[in-house]
Amino acid sequence: MTPDQTRNRVSYSHSSEIISSHRLSPDIHRIRFDNPILANNTLPGQFINIKVSTTNTPLWRRPFSLHNVSKEEGWVEILFRVVGIGTKMLSQYRQGQCLDILGPLGNHFIISHIYMHSGIMVAGGLGIAPFLFLSKLLLKDKIKPILFYGVKTASEFCCLDEFADLGVSTFLSTEDGSLGYKGFITDLVRDQIDQVADKQHTTMYACGPNRMMNTLGKIALAHHIKCQVSLETLMACGVGACLGCGVKANSEKLSYRYVCKEGPVFTISEIDLSD
Ligand SMILES: Cc1cc2nc3c(=O)[nH]c(=O)nc-3n(C[C@H](O)[C@H](O)[C@H](O)COP(=O)(O)OP(=O)(O)OC[C@H]3O[C@@H](n4cnc5c(N)ncnc54)[C@H](O)[C@@H]3O)c2cc1C
Ligand code: FES
């Protein structure tokens, strides 16, 4: 199966009550929504589109990865950084208020029960968002989750306790050396890859800046490791109508691939992230 074949054909618009809203650092927030239908019908890598305002400003919904999900308790969480008008508004909602959510949208990471013994997740910055949900599913399938997580400085790390509680093996890097390896996470992956993984039985999953994912693609290729990447482009319509979310295709037939319609998860060989 390719990521393109994992698209969920059914999505729902739901008014969802906020169960909790926490500020984890000055600009990073986590919101939990009560939404049993969504919680029971989504997989890691998929995203939701949230209408952050009751007026037309901002006009478009804002997309967020499903960060954490409890089917049993019927909730879903997002983890986000305040970068502009929509995320600022989102950060100001409080417990008990309701927001309109459209989802689940997009395709999801593929987990192969047949060959996988381990899954290497590589996160840059807020690219960590989908990996708590993915770790839980890997563990459920008895596949060892390994996390490589890089940020600029130690105060930007999120959810390290949650990953530790799950027993995820974690490798950290900071660009300023304030915690973990000093440098880029891709250098740490390159250093450790021979030790941490039985490559034939591993898939690499990546989410973060395009430059990071482009470098990882090369590392994965050199080590014959399958690699899936989750892309976060600017989005407007979110449904394939405006062609605003295109990324260069690595193909002679197609110029672009569209993240909202064909992604957000692609195998690294499908796209060209070299720019
Ligand atoms: C599939 C998908 C999943 C996402 N998941 C998450 C997530 O889990 N957590 C999270 O924090 N963010 C996530 N994002 C990014 C998030 O959607 C944007 O940060 C958000 O829409 C910004 O809205 P805003 O109104 O606050 O910013 P705007 O006011 O619209 O823009 C503010 C600034 O941020 C820039 N910007 C906006 N969106 C993006 C983007 N996608 N990539 C790079 N720069 C951008 C704009 O160019 C502008 O400079 C995801 C995006 C996609 C497409
Ligand atoms: S956001 Fe409009 S086509 Fe993808």
Image (cartoon, rainbow, N blue to C red):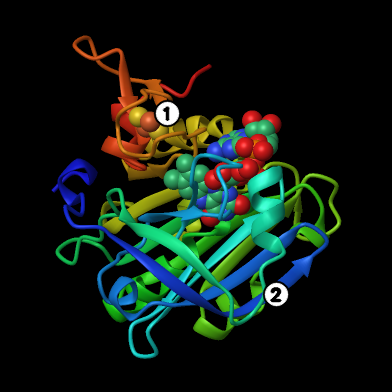
Question: Observer-nearest residue: 234 or 203?
Answer: 234
Indicate if the residue with disc 1 has its beta carbon within 8 Å of ligand 2: yes
Task: Give the image location of residue 247, x and y in percent.
Answer: 40, 24
Indicate if the residue with disc 2 has its beta carbon within 8 Å of ligand 1: no
Name the residue rendered at 72%, 53% in the picture.
Answer: 88
Judged from this view, the residue extending furthest toward the front is 55
What is the CA distance from the residue labelled 2 to the residue labelled 1?
30 Å
- For disc 1, the marked residue is 245
* Mark 2 burial class by Cα count in 10 Å: few <14, some 14-19, many 20+: some
Q: Is residue 95 above or below residue 232?
A: below
Task: Give the image location of residue 228, x and y in percent.
Answer: 35, 44
Question: Observer-nearest residue: 122 or 34?
Answer: 34
Q: Secondary structure at mark 1?
A: loop
The numbered disc on residue 22 is 2
Task: Give the image location of residue 47, x and y in percent.
Answer: 40, 54
Q: Quadrant of residue 161?
A: bottom right
Q: Is residue 33 above or below residue 119?
A: below
- Looking at the rendered structure, the kind of residue marked 2 is His
Name the residue rendered at 47%, 35% in the picture.
Answer: 235
Q: Is residue 71 above or below residue 211?
A: below
